[in-house]
Image (cartoon, rainbow, N blue to C red):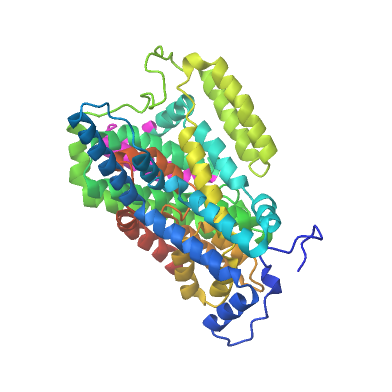
Amino acid sequence: MISSAGSIPSFPLPLSAYPAVTPGARLLDVLRARIDAEPFNAVATAIFLLAILHTFAAARFAALASTVQRRHDVQARAEGRAAVPRVVAELLHFFGEVEVVFGLWAVVLLIAITFAKGWEVATHYLNDGVDYTDALFVVVIMALASTRPVVRVAERALGQLATIGRCTPAAWWVSILTIGPLLGSIITEPAAMTISALLLARQFYDLRPSSPLKYATLGLLFVNVSVGGTLTHFAAPPVLLVASAWNWDTPFMLTHFGWRAALAIGISTGCYYLAFRRELKALASRPAEVDIEQPDEDADAAAPALLPVPPWVTAVHLLFIGWMVFNLHYPALFLGGFLFFLGFARATAAYQSRVQLRSPLLVGFFLGGLVIHGGLQGWWIAPVLSSLSRVPLFLGATLLTSFNDNALITYLATLVPNLSDTLRYTVVAGAVTGGGLTVIANAPNPAGQALLAGFFGGSVSPLRLLAGALIPTLITALLFIVL
């Protein structure tokens, strides 16, 4: 087939170009026929699976990097030399950064496409065939949501609820994990994740909870944010991508998803509170280790003390967030607005903490790499979804979300012809339910991991995260299926 440009072959092959699926055909036969039609499908999916395996091995790379550097430092001191970073250790540390995994394997994918299809096809796919809007938006909204004025106003708002429990760590924990995710239906899920993670760092993780409670909290946060954006039709990427195609609006989302999501968040948080209530109460007697506004490793330690934030500065920050959310489909507008914001932040530096760009850029890089790989997985995801009935479809969407961004799952569902209203609801419900099982399951998850990884020794264990998210996921699944 020829692309719209008239000279570059279509890549990836459109789903409509594959042989028609005959009624009763086995799924394996359908997938085999699609590989025969486009052999590169098997290569692209194999590279994607290797990237997923790399995310599970990232912690081992980080540990190995520390071991190599430590041995080098010991040897250098024994020989009377100054200890310097080893290139091997730095490379291993780089491979241990979860946020760069999909970008690294995107390079492998680019090489593979070049050998199989040619350089022109490879560059056309990466430049014109992939939509990076969500990745760019996450960078902008994450940087804005983590600024001092926004965190302060969010903390005051959630603090009003925490006062019911006398502002204890347990009260803050409940407040952040219930109201914070629901804010995702208004200010978008990436912003809700950023604010919730920053406040959890200040009010909870600084108090050094046990490892089981740390992972339970992170898993609960990821699941709650994934479903917390479903009260409206414009804030959660997996909903946003189907809303216009299926004519879903906010009243539809509230009546079909919103109340179930709010109930799931409340029940899941309540169950974890009951399970860890003794430790949560004991945290009130522990001093915090660090402050959320401590400068990062690149900040100037000699910077003067910050002044209290005036209301007008906070108002301008909220207006900038409103501009970004309103124009989230238009990169030229939200990126342009972000440049104006950086100028405003510089002009009001006396009231600002340093604008953090490292974590947002790494998260954006992660998501950019993910959509590059995800754009080549439709050949097998679409027939898998279309071959399932209601309950298997829900379970299949939940499982597939663990290995793909849930927005990709719902987008591919819009390509399945004649999908009933019941199955449309089912696939979206399954996609948002599974959004907390892994770091790659929901676009805001990498932001939460990047902000909280320091409390997990620099790297979050995928298996322990899965264990922490499992119970909230099961509760949410039951509510979406049964009610």
Q: Nearer the viewer, residue 11 or 273?
A: 11
Question: In percent of the image, x 50 and y 47: which residue is there?
Answer: 366
Judge whether residue 256 is colored magenta: no
Residue 254 in view: no
- Describe residue 241's horizontal placement relative to residue 164 as left or right: right
Q: Horizontal placement of 210 versus 30: left or right?
A: left
Residue 265 in percent (x, y) is at 39, 52
Please tell me whether the stretch drawn in magenta is mainly helix, strand or loop.
helix
Residue 271 visible at all = yes
Residue 187: x percent and y percent? 54, 40
Pick whichever, 15 or 428, lies toward us: 15
Residue that appears at 68% across and 42% down: 330
Please give the count of numbered marks on the rendered protein.
0
Q: Is residue 395 above or below residue 373?
A: below
**Rendered residue at 60%/21% (across/down):** 343
Residue farthest toward the right in the current orientation of the protein: 6
Out of 245 and 290, give the one closest to the viewer. 290
Q: Residue furthest bottom?
A: 24
Q: Quadrant of residue 135?
A: top right
Residue 266 x %, y %: 37, 51
Q: Which residues are magenta?
A: 159-185
Looking at the picture, tell me which residue is in the foreground, 159 or 343: 343
Quadrant position of the N terminus in the picture: bottom right
Relative image position of residue 377 (x, y in whole percent): 56, 65
Residue at the location (69% across, 58% down)?
121
- The reply to whether the magenta stretch includes residue 182 is yes
